[in-house]
Image (cartoon, rainbow, N blue to C red):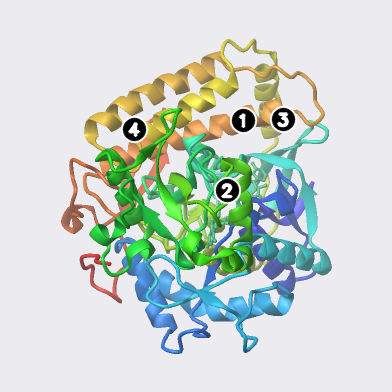
Amino acid sequence: MKIDVLIVGAGGAGLYAALSAVKENKDLNIAVLSKVYPTRSHTGAAQGGINGALANVDPTDNEELHTFDTIKGSDYLADQEAVKYMCYEAPKIIREMEHMGVPFSRLNNGKIAQRPFGGASKDRTCYSADKMGHVMLHTLFEQCIKEGVTFLNEWFMLNLVHNGKRLVGVTAINIATGEVELIKTKAVILATGGHSRIYWGYTSNALGCTGDGTAAILRAGLPVKDMEFLQFHPTGLRKSAILVTEAARGEGGHLLNNKGERFMAKYAPDKMELGPRDLVSRSIMTEIRENRGFRDEEGREYVQLDLTHLGAEKIKKRLPQIRELAIDFEGIDPIKEPIPIKPTAHYAMGGIDTNVKCETPMEGIYAAGESQCVSVHGANRLGGNSLLDIVVFGNVAGKEAVRYAEGTDFAKGGEGKKEEEVKFIKELMNKESKETLGDMRNELGEIMFKHFGVFKNEDEMQEGYNKLKNLIERAHKNLGVEDKSKVFNLDLQSTLEFFNLLEIADVLAYASLQRKESRGTFFRDDYEKRDDENFLYHSVITRNSDGSFNYKKGEVQLGLYEPAERKY
Ligand SMILES: Cc1cc2nc3c(=O)[nH]c(=O)nc-3n(C[C@H](O)[C@H](O)[C@H](O)COP(=O)(O)OP(=O)(O)OC[C@H]3O[C@@H](n4cnc5c(N)ncnc54)[C@H](O)[C@@H]3O)c2cc1C
């Protein structure tokens, strides 16, 4: 198979990249390859909204304020010109999506409605009730079909193939048949999404958020960036960790401890519940640690998110999905009772190292979306900025990849790669499993949540890293595939995804141990302060051929705002 520009991933980033690519050059062969059917990508689960300084609600809002809020929110680790670019593109790209047919919620005057969100100084988050990602994903998919983008649905990318100078192609399995292919391509855009599933059982992410593209980058000898930064969202449901959108607090929800106090008054007196996510998550965990939380019969600890005072009408109109989720997964109707919540692993700020043109250091390989780290979110992403990031940089990646593909031919090489993959998979299928995948995944989630959670310290992390190394070794030795069939072998796919999770957890743990400070979402009890003198840098990591890591310090692009203490 030969494809000029191949986009791996059909979430918001992949679909926007594909749209921009076909609009840029209709004569090229442009295809999207996705392991799930496109409209099942995790973007469809996004609830609260997308940020852009349209100033529809507050006429004093503008792009500059959006830029500043984002940089402050990032704890000054974001690259400032990149943030500026994203925030100035926002109003344009949101209106463009409106024209494509995205059904935004409206103000009485007909303009796109905007709600307050965490860490934002103005009401800036555009929304569609609490289903923003769902409507964006469906609209973008329709547009791609209309423009004639080719789709390879339910194909699983295995690895990148390059010749040391430039990309040759990717290897992938057609899930429906089990056949492995080498797909030759001039340019690839990795839009494979986040990796919060390393916190298995403690995450808001879909089952497929396993960081496959990021793991493939590491195996290809290319760099990942800022992997130690993984965001905990303050409000996951107590039992399932399913997300309750920040919009619940944006619409006026209160966080309560076991004394019935709105405890955020202590931690963020001005912003209260609408402090940034890192701060609110830590505040919840502090209440729980200091015995002001609740504990259920099964020992689960939590605090309450109270929406009852908003009234039935507002909850039904603005937060219908949240109500459904609370009823289905907690047996609680938020119109009548507070929702039990606790922080949940939610978003990867770190990922594939690219510049603002979405280029990796290897010619022909691009990345966009949550799998990519430009970085515009630094040490802590603001809610509503990811749906923005994925379309803004999806757009850039699509155009840049087309430009590159126009000026080049298919690279030679890669012949033995397909056979290597076939051999690897055959061995995995023939191996007798000595442990079960399900147990091992739970073990991974436990290690990560306990040792690399909201609060960290040297001893806990070191102990966790030792456990993780042991798990990795056992997985490679003991894990085989029980289901021996070729057609739709999800056992095989889950096993391959688990190996990717281990790859990511390994580098995240390693990166965490190197950063001896607290910044944004990354908080250590033993180094509670941000340390700009020694740690204001991006961690850039590659894997050496002997399996060890190579650690470099990447410059943070400042220039617009001097790093200052964050107060809310
Ligand atoms: C519950 C939830 C709510 C959220 N709410 C908001 C919000 O309100 N506002 C906001 O700004 N952000 C929100 N976010 C974050 C935001 O939704 C995500 O960061 C963003 O949608 C990621 O988009 P993406 O296109 O990069 O990846 P995804 O949408 O995750 O798509 C990844 C794609 O890659 C494909 N893929 C992955 N691996 C492979 C492989 N090996 N082979 C082939 N294909 C592969 C998948 O099939 C999928 O199509 C939320 C996230 C969650 C989890």
Residue type, mark 1 in image:
Leu
Say which residue appears at 83% left-offset and 68% top-offset: 146
Disc 2 element? helix
Q: Nearer the viewer, mark 1 or mark 3?
A: 3
- Tell me the distance, in whole angstroms, between the alpha carbons under discs 1 and 3: 10 Å
Disc 1 element? helix
The reply to whether the C-beta atoms of the residues labelled 1 and 3 are less than 8 Å apart is no
First-in-chain label (2 vs 3):
2
- Which residue in the protein does label 4 denote? 451
Residue type, mark 4 in image:
His
Q: Nearer the viewer, mark 2 or mark 3?
A: 2
The reply to whether the C-beta atoms of the residues labelled 2 and 1 are less than 8 Å apart is no
Q: Nearer the viewer, mark 1 or mark 4?
A: 4
- Which residue in the protein does label 2 denote? 326
Say which residue appears at 66% left-offset and 27% top-offset: 420
Query: From the viewer's perspective, is 493 left or right of 76?
Result: right
First-in-chain label (2 vs 4):
2
Q: Nearer the viewer, residue 161 or 79?
A: 79
